[in-house]
Amino acid sequence: MNFKLRSRHVLIAIFVFFLFITPLSPEVTLAQESEGTPTGLGRPPEVTSNWDADRSRQSASADADFYAFLPVAVEPSSAAKTYSSCATNTQETKLASMAKVDPNQERPKMNCHPILSQVAHARAKDMAQKGYFSHITPDGYGPNFLVAQAGYDLPEWWPDSLSENYIESIAGGYPTAQAAWDAWLHSASHRTHVLGENDFWAEQTNYGIGYVYIEGSPYGHYWVFITAPPEE
């Protein structure tokens, strides 16, 4: 009788050991990363140079002090043109002067456009206030869409997309207009845009420049250079 009880106790002890002490194998589900096309600089048909497109969505990070990113084309809009002046702050005026007098500037002329100026300044302020650094806003809109919504008539043949960009260069962290301009000039893709080194950008003779400094924002200094062809 005692032998049977002991055997039963042993079996129960073994069962309890495996039930409560031995770890169960967890079910592991691995999420597969998608290999989607990077959303960065929209490449117009005339452009064949290489772009750092995959970096355009990079968010602002305290680990990096300086960045210079390049152009994104979107859906034109018939929104009413409400801007009447091309008001700029001191830093915006300095950067515009550098763009115009640079001996390598390929644009035959450069005209500050009030809508492009307003959008460029608003873009710089939006990035600083919301703590991101990208051609695409947190709502998913690119600069061409914003320009068109503001009332600027972009070419009808440009692709209808909310996430492309043919018109904007941005820079973050540079404390002066000269530093921001030099950064663009030392980046092959940005240089092509800001100096109009091919026909596509050389024809974008209207421009707007935005600069904002907000203390405590990820980069502090935010620069936006928008160009566009004359309205048709």
Image: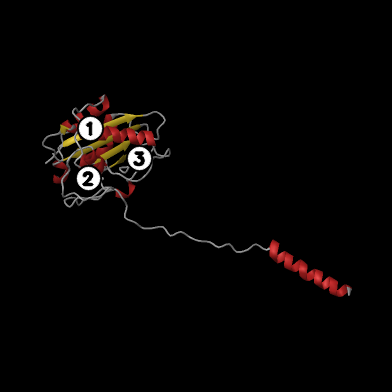
Q: According to the image, label 2 marks what residue?
A: 166
> Viewer-proximal residue, 25 or 122?
122
Residue 100, image x, y percentages: 17, 32
Q: Which part of the image, by quadrant, shows the C terminus?
A: top left
In which quarter of the view is residue 165 placed? top left
Amino acid type of the residue tagged 2 in the rendering? Tyr
Q: Secondary structure at mark 1?
A: helix
CA neighbours of label 2 inside 10 A, class few (<14), some (14 to 19), many (20+): many
Q: Nearer the viewer, mark 1 or mark 2?
A: 1
| The disc label shown at residue 142, or none | none
In which quarter of the view is residue 219 placed? top left
Taking the spot 48% from the left edge, 60% from the top edge, the residue there is 30
In which quarter of the view is residue 86 placed? top left
Q: Secondary structure at mark 3?
A: loop
Residue 190 seen in this snapshot: no
Check whether the beta carbons of the residues at disc 1 and disc 3 lie within 8 A of each other.
no
Asked if residue 173 is positioned above or below residue 5 in the image, the reply reads above
Distance between the alpha carbons at the discs numbered 3 and 2: 17 Å
The mark that comes first in sequence, 3 or 2, is 3
Amino acid type of the residue tagged 1 in the rendering? Ser
The mark that comes first in sequence, 1 or 2, is 1
Q: Which residue, as the protein is rendered here, is positioned at the far right?
A: 1
Residue 94, image x, y percentages: 23, 27
Q: According to the image, label 3 marks what residue?
A: 133
- Horizontal side of 130 relative to 120 (left or right) equals right
Distance between the alpha carbons at the discs numbered 1 and 3: 19 Å
Taking the spot 23% from the left edge, 39% from the top edge, the residue there is 147
Q: Nearer the viewer, mark 1 or mark 3?
A: 1
Q: Which part of the image, by quadrant, shows the N terminus?
A: bottom right
Q: According to the image, label 1 marks what residue?
A: 117
Check whether the beta carbons of the residues at disc 1 and disc 2 lie within 8 A of each other.
no
CA neighbours of label 1 inside 10 A, class few (<14), some (14 to 19), many (20+): many
